[in-house]
Amino acid sequence: MSGRARLALCAAAATLMASCALLPLVAEPTWLLQLVPLVAVQTGVGAAARRVPLGRPLTVAAQALVTLVMLTLVFARQHAIAGLVPGPDTFRYFAELLRQGADDVGRYAIPAPVTDGIKLMLIGGVLVIGLLVDTLAVTFRSAAPAGLPLLALYSVAAGLSDGGADWLWFLVAAGGYLMLLLAESRDRLAQWGRVFGGAPRAPGAPEAGAVAPVRTGRRIGAVALGVALMVPLALPAMHGGLLDAAGTGVGAGGGHGGTVSAVNPLVSLRDNLNTNDDRQVLSLRTDTNDISDLYLRIVSLDEFDGTTWTPAQRHIVGVPDRLPTPVGLGGDVKRGTVRTTVRAADWYAQNWLPMPYPPSGVKVGGRWRYEPVGMTLVGDRGQTTRGETYQVTSLDVQPTARQLAAAPEPPAALQSEYTKVPSSLPKVVERTAKEITAGADSHYEEAVKLQDWFAVTGGFQYDTSVKVGRGPGAIANFLKQKEGFCVHFSFTMAAMARTLGIPARVAVGFAPGTPQADGTIAVNQKDAHAWPELYFEGVGWTRFEPTPTRGTTPSYTQPDTPGSSLPEEALPSRGASSAPSAAASPSESCAGGLRRLEACDSPSAAAVPHHEDGGTDWWGWLLIGLGALAVLAVPLSPLLWRQRVRALRLGGHARTAEGAAAHTLAAWQELTDSAWDHGITPDESLTPRRAADRIVRLGRLDPAAGGAVHRVADAVEQVLYAPRPRPAAGAAEDVRRVVEGLRGAVGTGTRLRALFLPRSSVRVLWAVSARWSALRTRVAAARPTLRRPSRQQG
């Protein structure tokens, strides 16, 4: 394998390793597997173009053209000429996909679904970075500045990610960059021979110096590619659903045009729910006297795959002045009107607008869109609830138990969509549902029996620390252990209802908050909740509450006291207190979102002593500090190294002839390295005088700086050739004058590169390679030689 081919392989591997930092941002890692062959083709085209050989601009143009064709095949084949050649329609489609991707990035919480727009941004962005890295490191043979696009790729990922494994991705990306630098340095060593290659070879010894870089580069490339492919598959937390321990369920769908397919809000809320301070999320003012049913609904989860409930892909439209009547609500059902003003906290950035259900009108500023099926509002182009104040008019629907029991069959289309259950759902779910509801005369009675079994008679316990496992067996484990919290109860009751033929979905939002002394209602983080909604024709989507000790039991599920919805005094979390309180909200409804399925714990903040959390332990802060130093040190290490070397070379020296000679040679080395940093590659074949002429000419130095170069060169010739060298004073000052002249003669880009990514920093790798070669030579010399038995006979 040639030096450039090996370097190209390492550049491709470094790009893939750095792109691994993007994995935590999205829900599925499959895009990376799709990216690998595209990067391979891009790298292969560059290698073939350089072998022809083509000029550097033509090589880059060929790679860019092939990259565009590959993106067209993957994303816009239907809009291309003959399915291959990109045309005007192709570029318009790319622009639309990028616009959608930008909207999706602002709309979805991490990990986001891999929509077409986001996939194009991921794959296209990495291919652009890969082209830059290949161009800098291979085409122009300068691997050091290739770290800038790799650093940009990692920085974007680290800036968006809120995970705790960012240090791992930093190590992977940094390893790829260091591997690229090592490959370049070994290639230079193989070309320049033993001058830079370390210890001389013994006469007749094989040319190990030329073979070792090839062998090492091949091994490095193979290992790097293996790591880039295997790491995303081996790491945890890349799969799973909201019933998994990690709770990483996401929505499905492509997000084309006027549609929305969002990450589950439970995921976006989870980092804010399981906290000790329980900060206030929303402040409400309402005209209703009974807030026990004032649930704030964010979104409904209506697709069920046996493991996870997620929002379906839905069309979104502009927000109408008056929202339509909810589907299925008949005119004979009693209803009232509730007006609520909501103010969101400045720190609370939710993409969905929390509202009482069903809303009939919304007054809100900003870029919001309406999703008619779920009757929800979703932010457009990065719009969130942060600091928003809005007014919601909603219906207080008050069906009776008789109306729900007499509900006719729902429409066939709705029945088919909302009673789907996957074949992977354990049979025990349906069997248990039928056993519980045996003898029921209507779907309403079945729903009430399910609710009562979970909340009262089934022996279930509310426990935030329970782990029910992952996959389709999670619901079966929950039914067996009978311990869990709102996510488990709502998900399982909705799944059971579907097995009985009752249309069901899961709602996510906030349970009623706590009244305050100033007349407002405080909704805190731990008021987050999940509950099932079942559909009854003539009433519409109807809330049920299976979670014990949380939320409020709907009045229409209590046929003996149909008008009562008062909370039980013994269960503080089941309802909102009707008495004002000057204290902050202690309410603890289920924290539905729930990092690692853990949150709601204490039944009452007033009854349980408050323990202050000391925050992150000292060792945690130490690790954070060390990580921050590492993040700063790696990109700044070339700058810091050059500053240190320059200080040593131009510093003081021994007041002897030997010390003066060593100082003069060090000053000349610093001068030539500084010229190298500014684009003047050293030529070891020239004498100091000829090298000085070349630096003055290529560096376009003024007479003062040019005279300084020649003075240092004359001093070097004195040291090298004069029988009795005359010490030359002022060499350090001359070098500094030359450096200033070089800086003034180049552009800003070259000046910044000379400062932050100096070319001469490659000497570090040369020194490491030389020491490694010397160490191997010493080890080989110290190893005992085994004499082979003689083949002579007699």
Image (cartoon, rainbow, N blue to C red):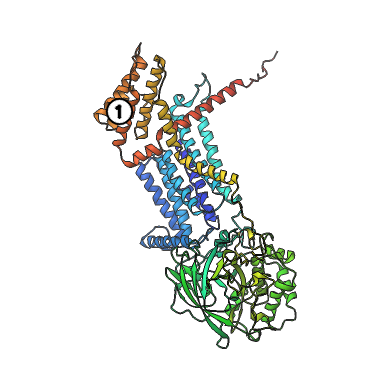
The residue that appears at 29% across and 25% down in the rendered structure is 708
Q: Is residue 26 left or right of residue 61?
A: right
| Residue 283 x %, y % | 52, 69
Q: Is residue 131 left or right of residue 701?
A: right
Q: Which residue is mark 1?
A: 694
Q: Is residue 120 left or right of residue 410?
A: left
Out of 555 and 353, give the one closest to the viewer: 555
The residue that appears at 50% across and 27% down in the rendered structure is 770
Quadrant for residue 711, please give it. top left
Residue that lies at the very extreme toward the top in this rendered image: 723
Residue that lies at the very extreme toward the left in this rendered image: 703
Question: Around disc 1, counting alpha carbons within 10 Å, would you say few (fewer than 14), some (14 to 19), or many (20 or more)?
Answer: some
| Residue 87 x %, y % | 37, 60
Q: Height in image: 688 above or below 725?
A: below
Out of 486 and 49, give the one closest to the viewer: 486
Q: Amino acid at mark 1?
A: Arg
The residue that appears at 29% across and 36% down in the rendered structure is 744
Q: Is residue 399 visible?
A: yes
Out of 559 and 504, give the one closest to the viewer: 559
